[in-house]
Amino acid sequence: MKVGVAHKLFLALLTAAVLSVFSAVVIMQWNISRGFLKFINSVEQSGVSRLTGKLEEFYRSEQKWDLLRSDPARWNRLIAVSMPQVGPPHGSNWPAPPPPEERMPDGPPPQHIPDENHGPMQPRISHDFEQRIFLLDGSKNVLINNAKVTVDTTVTPLLYQGRIIGYLGLSPRQIIADAPQQRFLREQKLALGLTAGVVVLLASALSLLLARRLVKPIQELTHATHQLAAGSFAVRVPVAAHDELGQLARDFNALAVTLEQGELTRRQWVADISHELRTPLSILRGEIEALQDGIRQPTTDTINSLHSEVMHLVRLVDDLYQLSLSDVGALTYRKSELDLASVLEGTVMPFRSDFLSKNISLELKIPENCGVSFFGDSERLHQLFSNLLDNSLKYTDSGGRLQVALHVDNSKITIDFNDSAPNVPETELGRLFERLYRVESSRNRLTGGAGLGLAICRNIVTAHNGNIMAQASSMGGLWIRIELPGASS
């Protein structure tokens, strides 16, 4: 049988509660027995204090212990008078209190001390009390009772005219043997046991409710995970708490959103690649079928058209390959110390003739005598700058201009590409670095490439621990800013 988390949690909480209650009951029962025994011994000690006074009065009148030692009945009567009654003994021969007319008008009522004719001592505190009390003389020799004197036995000195005439002691009770006292302890322990049982039942109910409450979010997460694994990326779990389980639910929802967006991107990616490949392939197919049918002749123009479409496919496949290598981290980077200004200037120079042929002014601003030391891959940086230059060359209107500027400080290196009209709508700026994304909705292949250049640029900048962003240019076009770590970073 499979035991679920709820059952395990319930058993763990219940076990902890039962062990706690059991330990408390055992300790409290032991403490009740021990405390009650100490209470009985303290009560008996109070009787010993009163008996001490009676014995000192006896010695004051007799000047010796012989009469008391030879008369056990007198010893028992002194004990009986001194010990407090728990209750009136049944069948007792003790005289009732004297009537009011016998009381002295100006003094305390007379004491009625029983004598030997009143019969034996009635049971008061304990039936074995007289067996545990003893009297010693001044030299601590036993006068009355041969009770065993232990280490914890307390003896009280008896005094007469400032000298010790004897000792009175009581051996402490070790167990509770009287039936009423045992019945009292049983009742207390039974009440304690019933209380423990009620506490265990309440703990069981609370443990079950708590276990179910704690496991419910886990069950919801488990069910949602199964749906997510089955491809249902729209699934979400409710966040009903601010604890670790609530944080787990929020993280799950964030994961679901990421997977959902990734699935949408993947579908768009497949659709865009299909579109990009289908267009040149359709043109190639039409051209070749026209040649096969004799509609067109294999002239130089026809061969050039076919070659142009093949080269477009080659560039597209190469861009896809470069982007895939960058995504998986397999794009090779051979970094070394280089002069970033020289790399940027060396990349711009070959493009000047292309910009000039399109009547676009190309301006490069690099601080004079500025050697910018940077740790990077010169080939990938050349690819980065080339993609940005090519992007401006394709989209900037004739008669416009492109301004490339390099700024250096201790914390970062900034490279700006500012071109003139046309501009990019602000709503589209955030998507420029997406794969296969182009601003023009017609996807005109004559004005731009496949939309992979800026995505590759972003990966190259990221690999150099930098940041790239796009915003509107003050010149009416697009402003691409690259930020790379400086020498002090």
Image (cartoon, rainbow, N blue to C red):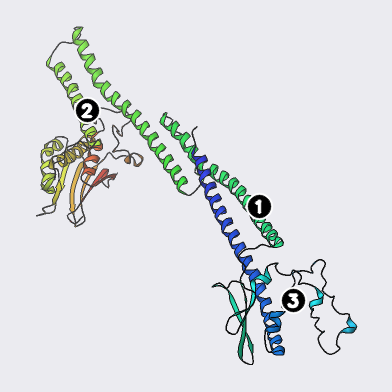
| Mark 2 crowd level (few <14, some 14–19, many ≥20, 10 Å Cα) | some
User: In which image quadrant can residue 33 be found?
Assistant: bottom right
> Residue 482's spot in the image, x, y percent?
23, 46
Q: Is residue 1 left or right of residue 199?
A: left
Q: Amino acid at mark 2?
A: Leu
Task: Give the residue at mark 3.
Answer: 73
- Residue 397 in view: no
Q: How many marks?
A: 3
Q: Foreground residue, 372 or 24?
A: 24
Going 90% across and 83% down the picture, which residue do you hit?
A: 101
The image quadrant that residue 50 belongs to is bottom right
What is the secondary structure assignment of the residue under circle 2? helix
- The residue indicated by pointer 2 is 316
**Above or below: residue 447 compared with residue 179:** above
Task: Tell me where residue 66 appears, x and y as whole percent.
Answer: 68, 84
- Residue of label 1: 194
Left or right side of 416 for 117: right
Vertical placement of 479 versus 395: above or below?
below
